[in-house]
Amino acid sequence: MNMGWGEYLLAVLGLTAITVVTRSFFMLSQREMPLPEWFKRGLKYAPLAALTAVIAPELFMSNGHLIATLRDARLPALLCAGGYYFWRRGILGTIVVGMLVYLPLHIGLGW
């Protein structure tokens, strides 16, 4: 697709305008908007759901297909990081443990 710089600029400006409007929508009102209690409870889980939606395909897929072999460094790293999280409940430690397992397997053994 051959697009000129003007079309790219228009796309960036349009996406910027949409982002600003949608993110500032709740700040434009002078009074607090009432939200149902079930909606407030659901908002607590939104960051976790978004993070899961981003990370899960990276853990279980490779080149658009499910991982077909157990010889993939991501799987042992996932198990160790998950075990650490359920043991200590710490995010930073979970990341460190996962990377300490992943990097030697991926870089060292070529998994």
Image (cartoon, grey):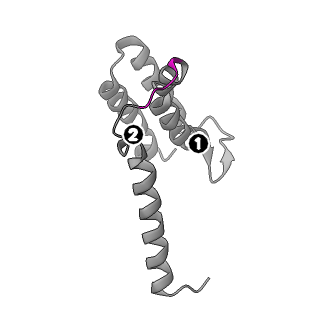
Q: Nearer the viewer, residue 15 or 105?
A: 15
Give the class, few, some or many, for how many residues have Cα within 10 Å of label 1's Cα (few <14, many ≥20).
Answer: few
Amino acid carrying mark 2 in the image: Pro
Which numbered disc, 2 or 1, marks the residue closer to the eye?
1
Q: Which quadrant of the figure contains the N terminus?
A: bottom right
Highlighted magenta segment, given as a residue range: 33-37
Amino acid carrying mark 1 in the image: Pro
Main secondary structure of the magenta stretch = loop
The magenta stretch spans residue 28: no
Q: Position of residue 10 (x, y in %)?
A: 47, 77
Q: Quadrant of residue 9?
A: bottom left
Q: The residue tagged with tag 2: helix, strand or loop?
A: helix
Q: Residue 16, labelled with which disc?
A: none
- Residue drawn where x is 58% and y is 86% of the image: 2
Q: Is residue 61 left or right of residue 74?
A: right
The magenta stretch spans residue 35: yes
Q: Residue 104, labelled with which disc?
A: 2
Q: Nearer the viewer, residue 40 or 109?
A: 40
* Residue bearing the label numbered 1: 57
Q: The residue tagged with tag 1: helix, strand or loop?
A: helix
Q: Is residue 83 left or right of residue 72?
A: left
Label 2 to label 1: alpha-carbon separation:
22 Å
Q: Position of residue 47 (x, y in %)?
A: 45, 33
Q: Position of residue 55 (x, y in %)?
A: 51, 39
Q: Is residue 108 left or right of residue 11?
A: left
Q: Nearer the viewer, residue 104 or 87?
A: 87
Q: Position of residue 18 (x, y in %)?
A: 47, 59
- Residue drawn where x is 36% and y is 28% of the image: 97
